[in-house]
Every structure is written in C-alpha cells, then in structure tokens.
Amino acid sequence: MKNIIVTGGLGFIGSNLIEILIKKKYFVINLDKITYSSNFYNTREYKNSKNYKFLRCDIKDKKLKKIIFKYKPIGIFNLAAETHVDRSIDSPKNFIQSNIVGVYNLLESFKEYSKKYKSKLIHISTDEVYGDVLRGRSSENYPYQPSSPYAASKAASDHLVSAYIRTYKIPAIVTNCSNNYGPKQHPEKLIPKLIYNILNNKPLPIYGRGKNSREWIYVKDHCEALLKVFTRGKIGEFYNIGSNKNLNNLKVSRELINVAKSIMKIGKKVKIQFIKDRPGHDLRYALNSNKIKNKLGWSAKTNFRHGVKLTFDWYNENKNYFKSLPRKDILKRLGKG
C-alpha cells in the first residue's frame, strides 16, 4: 500500500482530494489541526475505510516530522492553510502562522525526510498571488503582486517552497489554482453562501456592483489536476490550474438563481443585494493554464452550469452540513476593514 499524507484534509479541497486518492487505492493519512473550517462531515463517507487514517496535527507542530517518518509517504499534498480573504483583513496573524510559519516547519521536516526516502511534496497555492490581472491571463512567469494579507501569506509560502527547491534540492512542485467551487465548501465563500441563502429565503449579498471577475473551477477537476501533477509533474516546476472561464459575481448569482428555480420554488426574499465592497478587492483573476495542458495533458472537464447544478444538489441534499456549523460563521459579515 502506498501512503500519501494530505494536510488540511478536513477542509474543502483536501476532503475532495482524499476521496479521489482512496479510490485510486492509496492509503491516506489526513493531518488537520481542526479549525472553524475543518469539518468531519466532509470525511464521513470514508472515515471507516481501511485506506484512511485521521491524525490531529498542526503543520507547525514538532510532531509533524515524527508522523512523516513513521508513515513514510511517497507524497505529501499540502492543503493546510487559512484561505478566506475577509478573515485575513480582520486578523492577518493567523494567516502568517499557518501559511508561512507552518509551511516553513513542513519544509524543514520534508527536507530531512526526502534525504532518506523517495517522495514528493505538492504545495497547493492560489491565483490570488498574482493580484489584479486586468487584461489577458497570468502564466507561471507572471509577477506576484498580492493584494490581501491572505494572498501575501500564500505568495510567501510559494517563495519559501521555491527557495527550498533551489537551495536544498527538495523534490517539490507548486500549483496555483483559480477559484474552486463544489461540495463541502465552507459557506463563508461566495457560492455556498449564496446557496445557503437561497435555501433559507435570504437576500444574496454581493460586494460592490458584482463586477469582480473570477475564474471558476469545479473542485473535482482541480483534484484530478493535482493527481496528474503528482504522478507526471516535473520537480521544481510551478503549474497553473484553471478552467479558462471567467464569470463576474453578478453572473454567478444569476446562474445559481436559475439552477434553484429549476429544482424548487424559491422564496420572495431571494434577491441580489449589493453591499459595501471589501477593502483592496481585486477586480479580476485569470490564469493561463496552457503549461499543464500541453505538458501533462490535463484540462478542466466540468462546465460551470453543470458544476453549479451538482454543487447546488449536494447542499440541497446535505442540509445537515450547514447544521454542523455555527450560524455566526455562516451569517456574520467579515473583512469590513
């Protein structure tokens, strides 16, 4: 049995990745420190699988190195991170600790481990490190210009990984992905927040005038790309992972309303409501993903309309997911600055 460690595996992308890895017959060790965004509901389908083990561990912990040496993984996917821009505006410290100090500790542990055992580290990052991309699409050589404390902390972690690759020759790869959506995403993020409000007959809050544009990718497509990078990616490289399809927040909201109407009778309060914009809000992110397409033969399969339908169906059929979260984490507005 080939062991894989996934950090942050109780979260959105991590739990979806674990599902795919188990289906591929890997033995997965899920390391998670259990924060507000960690949810055991996300791993309920495979929590009793013989190919799965959960361990509570912060990647800043000293015991991380012991765990890595004990389980001898052939790969580590690092998804442990604080990820919500609004929270980073209110409290940058947590982002510095998790996304920079935590990654430093992981790199130090992996540096020692990879000298003795064959393995790969896949560090998962974001398109937000590139900042506003008002024209065209950012390739892997595009300069980093992060706008939020979150994006800056992820940019710093990417640079740390890159420096350890060059200085210490560690076998690592960095991926930068566009906005994910799909099952198991915390409703502090746009799409599950809107779905929650639709299901509960509440207005749909949209920052500014809804013109901010994002490149949207279905989470399972992203996870398939991560597996492709792990099995075929070149050590030391960066790979952008995106769908090449942009939508602004207003169009996302309207698409969700249309999906909801095809499934249920929506309440009278379900209307778009423009609210004060967040500080430093980037207008547009857009990735050039030609490298992963041309070098590794990967491209996104799920179009947005189908992916949003799958996503809405999951939340509609898993209302207990919302009940597993404190209501304040769903409803409270953060990041006012």
Image: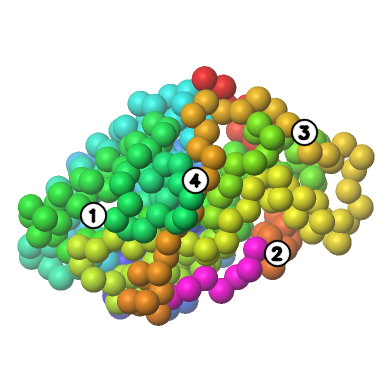
Q: Amino acid at mark 4?
A: Leu
Residue at 80 percent of width and 46 percent of height? 199
For label 4, the crowd category at 10 Å Cα-Cα, with few meaning under 14, some 14 to 19 and many 20 or more, is few
Element type where label 4 sits in the image: loop
Label 2 to label 3: alpha-carbon separation: 22 Å
> For residue 134, which numbered disc appears in the image?
4
- Which of pointers 2 and 1 lies earlier in the amino acid sequence? 1
The secondary structure making up most of the magenta span is: loop
Is residue 302 left or right of 156 when viewed as pictured?
Answer: right
**Stretch of the chain drawn in magenta:** 298-304
Please, what is the three-letter code of the amino acid marked with disc 2?
Arg
Asked which quadrant contains residue 225, the reply is bottom left
Q: Which mark is residue 273?
A: 3
Name the N-terminal-most of marks 2 and 3. 3
> CB of mark 4 within 8 Å of CB of mark 2?
no
Is residue 156 visible to us here?
yes
- Mark 3 against mark 4, which lies toward the viewer? 4
Callout 2: 10 Å neighbours few (<14), some, many (20+)? Answer: some
N-terminal label among 3 and 4: 4
* Residue pictured at 30% horizontal, 33% vertical: 97
Say whether marks 3 and 1 touch (CB < 8 Å).
no
Quickly name the residue at label 2. 305
Residue 287 locus on image (x, y percent) = 45, 57
Of the residues tagged 3 and 1, which is closer to the observer? 3
The residue tagged 1 is 67
Q: Please, what secondary structure does the residue beneath circle 1 have?
A: helix
Cα distance between the residues tagged 3 and 4:
25 Å
